[in-house]
């Protein structure tokens, strides 16, 4: 049996939507993107949703819109994918990394300590699809209003730190019944090939700015900003007689094409009724099998407040170090089962090391990373495959643990 880590889920609806786009005579940003935006708005109840070509470019767009500058600080967890910090760097601000909790998510206490009068934004990350402590984070930025120093009209209008959630993993997750998408000012989903809902490459920005911001007006501004700062998109301009346009901002070119939005439309149709419940089913099956092993530290996916989107199954093995974890992964690969590690904390990566970040400052991130193994989780997995994966994992872990006891 050969188990890949995360193959895309391509149903007939996806194929039909893509063919429809290809045959329609219009393949870049147009009606399919609008439809995908409205599907995501219907799911999340976000006032406005703007699709772009990746999570990363969406985050750069939002930070540029907010007007962050070289001296400004943006707080984010050390435990995340590199894009969270790279977006801040590309927007010319300074990433300020903080440590996480045992649930892998950014620590509220650590955020509180890191806030200064230069902090312009916070990017909490819903690791594995588990929502962060948003009511507390939102409360904290209000509480710290006095420290906030606005540098432009937009920042003055908000009057506090902007909260952008990195919801790359958490489409479909909820906090007290409210979907990610409306838990913070701005939420960005990734629609990359390995994510719960994909367009091959893509991102969706949920706009939920408080009054006096007008989210519809903001959508129009950002849409224009995502298309070179051009007043008309190519679809509108292609209509007879509508050739004339203007450039009003130094915009980015990060729009999503219709042919990719078509993949997302087909996926969204089955997400809530089928593919998300399937992920939850697999997560529960792993938890049930592994709860019988004393070495297994099981990941959380449900509490009285939170519901995960079950994007990653982040198993931890108690009592092993990083080297033993790597040995276990090598053993698991001999069963032809692909597993992964989410994530290598940013300070362990060369770029961030060279920038002066040190893993010693993030002990919980390191502890969580050193014994973490992500198991395959996607709707196509059968019960037989799940049993096989559990067997491969248990035998591999126990071989390493047992070898240790024998010494
Ligand atoms: C995948 C991912 C991103 C980047 O998403 P792209 O759409 O590839 O830009 C950002 N943050 C996290 C936590 C991710 O897992």
Image (spheres, rainbow, N blue to C red):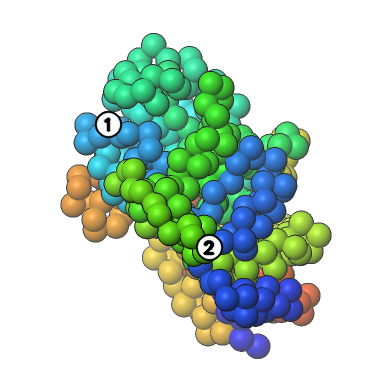
Q: CA distance from mark 2 to mark 1?
A: 43 Å
User: Where residue 356 sits in the image (x, y, percent)?
Assistant: 20, 45
User: Where residue 153 sits in the image (x, y, percent)?
Assistant: 36, 23
Q: Is residue 87 visible?
A: no
Of all residues, the one furthest to the bottom in this rendering is 1
Between 65 and 296, the one lying in front of the other is 65
Between 158 and 394, the one lying in front of the other is 158
Task: State the residue at coordinates (60%, 41%).
Answer: 48
Helix, strand or loop at mark 1 = loop
Of all residues, the one furthest to the top in this rendering is 146
Between 307 and 331, the one lying in front of the other is 307
Between 171 and 107, the one lying in front of the other is 171
> Could you tell which of marks 2 and 1 lies nearer the N-terminus?
1
Residue to which mark 2 is pinned = 239
Residue neighbourhood size for the residue with mark 1, other residues' Cα within 10 Å, grouped as few (<14), some (14–19), many (≥20): some
In the rendered image, the quadrant that contains the N terminus is: bottom right
Residue neighbourhood size for the residue with mark 2, other residues' Cα within 10 Å, grouped as few (<14), some (14–19), many (≥20): few
């Amino acid at each position: 049996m050969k188990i890949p880590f995360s193959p895309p889920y391509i149903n007939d609806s996806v194929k039909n939507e893509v063919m429809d786009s290809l045959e329609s005579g219009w393949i870049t940003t147009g009606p399919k993107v609008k439809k995908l935006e409205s599907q995501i708005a219907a799911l999340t109840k976000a006032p406005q949703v703007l699709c772009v070509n990746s999570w990363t470019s969406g985050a750069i767009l939002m930070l540029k819109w907010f007007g962050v500058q070289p001296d400004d600080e943006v707080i984010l967890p050390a435990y995340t994918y590199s894009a969270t910090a790279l977006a801040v760097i590309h927007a010319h601000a300074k990433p300020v990394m903080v440590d996480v909790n045992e649930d892998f998510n950014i620590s509220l206490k650590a955020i509180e300590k890191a806030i200064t009068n230069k902090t312009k934004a916070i990017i909490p990350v819903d690791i594995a699809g588990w929502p962060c402590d948003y009511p507390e984070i939102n409360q904290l930025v209000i509480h710290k209003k006095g420290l906030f120093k606005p540098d432009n009209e937009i920042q003055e209008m908000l009057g506090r730190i902007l909260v952008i959630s990195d919801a790359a993993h958490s489409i479909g997750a909820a906090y007290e019944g409210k979907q990610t998408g409306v838990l913070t000012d701005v939420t960005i989903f990734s629609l990359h090939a390995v994510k719960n809902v994909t367009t091959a490459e893509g991102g969706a920005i949920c706009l939920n700015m408080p009054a006096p911001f007008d989210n519809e007006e903001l959508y129009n501004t950002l849409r224009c900003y995502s298309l070179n700062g051009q007043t008309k998109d190519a679809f509108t301009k292609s209509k007879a007689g509508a050739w004339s346009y203007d450039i009003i901002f130094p915009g980015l070119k990060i729009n999503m094409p219709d042919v990719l939005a078509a993949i997302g439309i087909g996926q969204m149709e089955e997400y809530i009724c089928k593919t998300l419940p399937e992920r939850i089913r697999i997560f529960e099956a792993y938890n049930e099998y592994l709860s019988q092993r004393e070495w297994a530290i099981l990941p959380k996916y449900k509490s009285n407040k939170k519901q995960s989107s079950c994007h990653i199954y982040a198993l931890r093995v108690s009592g092993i170090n990083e080297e033993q974890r790597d040995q276990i992964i090598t053993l698991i690969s001999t069963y032809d089962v692909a597993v992964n590690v989410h994530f290598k904390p940013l300070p362990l990566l060369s770029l961030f090391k060279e920038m002066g970040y040190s893993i010693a400052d993030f002990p919980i991130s390191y502890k969580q990373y050193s014994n973490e193994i992500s198991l395959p989780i996607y709707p196509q997995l059968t019960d037989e495959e799940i049993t096989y994966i559990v067997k491969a994992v248990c035998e591999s872990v126990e071989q390493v643990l047992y070898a240790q006891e024998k010494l």
